[in-house]
Amino acid sequence: MNSISNIIFIVSGVFAAFAIFQLARSLKLKKENKSYEQLFQHINDTLLLIDIIDGKIMYANEAAQKMLGYPLAELTNKTIFNIHSKEQLARSSEVIATVYEKKGLIYTDLPFISASGERIDVECSAKVEDFAGKVVIFISARDIRERLHMQAQIKKQSDIIEQKNKDLIDSITYAKNIQHAILPSLSSMQQSFPEMFVLYKPKDIVSGDFYWHTSVKSSVNNGLASTGAKLDVISVVDCTGHGVPGAFMSLVGYTILNQTVNSPEVNTPGAVLDYMNREVVQTLNKKMDEIVINDGMDMSVCAFNPQTMKLNYAGANHVMYHIRGNVLTSYDGDKQAIGLQSQDQLKPFTNHELTIQKGDVIYMFTDGFEDQFGGDRNKKYMSSRFKEYLLSIHSHEMPEQQKMLEKEFLGWKRNNEQLDDVLVIGIRF
């Protein structure tokens, strides 16, 4: 009996100890739960603890109750699937499975449905955690309706801006077609100058640089030609600015250049520049009391008599290069622009006359090539390097020279932005 009593006593002691252990564990878990609950209540985001087995909502903080419109007692009788729309139950189950598999997930494609049936777009961060002796899914959710509304407004404005930009680019691209249409064709210029090239690289869609060509009969006797002699005239023009403002100026310049053909007093390149300056100043300053336009152009004009092989050149802030053999000669224009000086400040433009020999080459150009930054030290190309390069290629066929110049320009520019319009014309006589 004594041994049975001892066994009963020992078993009773074990059960008592186990009961005390369970009680202590329960008290510890309640204490932990209370600590978790107190911590959760100080977090502004919606917090939900989900049973990983059946999706039951084990706990929700005050932010969750406020967002979803349920009291805690009612919310903890629901599952995570009850606060998702019926149409997205499959996605809801998929998310729970993915969270369990990956131990965590961030998602925005599962809106909550409130007690009133309102859709609440949320961004959720879900993680698998140990809580109160269970493996649970801890979900932190943030209302993103305002953010989505703002994104939608931004998207709407972005779409409007994008459409306006597209319309603008389409308009400018069409303007480019018009600008190219008024430029003389290479084939028409080659009727006067069979061996020539035109390198034309606008910085933007449209350009402030342009070139002009015509063939006329001289109306007077002078050093260049006798009355009735045929003259081939070519001009290179660099208007103030580039892009749309430069393109508008180019139209002004092109129109006035066409008028010089019908003006009896215009018989030399210098006279062309004098006429251009008068007309540009008058055209741009008709409303000086309302608006002042300080724009103009740099340009050069060559007139060639194929009978006498005489060539006259005049420039406004432009230079012409002439190569004979392996010698390059610069013909500097006057240091004054077209349209920026009043008549009382302007000196007559100077004519430079030279006799051309067969095989001579001339180059007319704007400053875009020489002013481009690039190379190993990111410096300007400069006129000295330009002269050297022209001397190195001048004996090549003219179309080949164009390709070589373009390759040289792009190789120098590298990843730099093109700073200005580029225009180079080469002619071999």
Image (tube, rainbow, N blue to C red):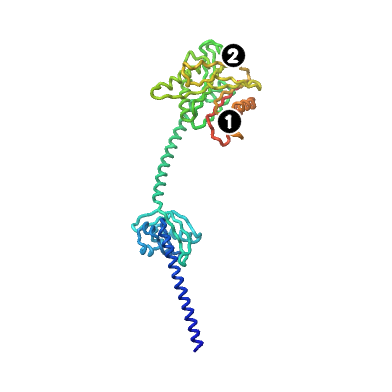
**Residue that protrudes farthest toward the left in the picture:** 116
Q: Which part of the image, by quadrant, shows the C terminus?
A: top right
Asked if the residue at tag 2 contacts the one at tag 1, i.e. Cβ–Cβ closer than 8 Å, the answer is no
- Provide residue 219's location: percent of width, then percent of height: 51, 12
Q: Residue at x 64, y 20 (%)?
A: 324
Amino acid marked by disc 2? Thr
Left or right of 91 on screen, residue 411: right
Q: Residue at x 43, y 21 (%)?
A: 283
Local secondary structure at mark 2: loop
Give the crowd class for mark 1: few <14, some 14-19, many >=20 residues within 10 Å: some
Badge number at residue 380:
1
- Provide residue 149's location: percent of width, then percent of height: 39, 48
Q: In the image shown, does 147 or 250 lie closer to the viewer?
A: 147
Q: In the image shown, does 388 or 221 lie closer to the viewer?
A: 388
Q: Choose the circle earlier in sequence order: 1 or 2.
A: 2
Left or right of 245 on screen, residue 330: right
Look at discs 1 and 2 and give the one toward the viewer. Answer: 1
Badge number at residue 69:
none
Left or right of 156 on screen, residue 372: right
Give the crowd class for mark 2: few <14, some 14-19, many >=20 residues within 10 Å: some
Above or below, comparing residue 24 to residue 109 in the picture: below
- Provide residue 413's location: percent of width, then percent of height: 57, 33
Q: Is residue 41 visible?
A: yes
**Label 1 – label 2 distance at C-alpha:** 39 Å
- Provide residue 196's location: percent of width, then percent of height: 58, 24
Above or below, comparing residue 87 to residue 256 in the picture: below
Q: Is residue 85 visible?
A: no
Q: In the image shown, does 219 or 34 lie closer to the viewer?
A: 34
Amino acid marked by disc 1? Lys
Q: Quadrant of residue 353?
A: top right
The number of numbered discs placed on residues in the rendered structure image is 2
Which residue is tagged 2? 308
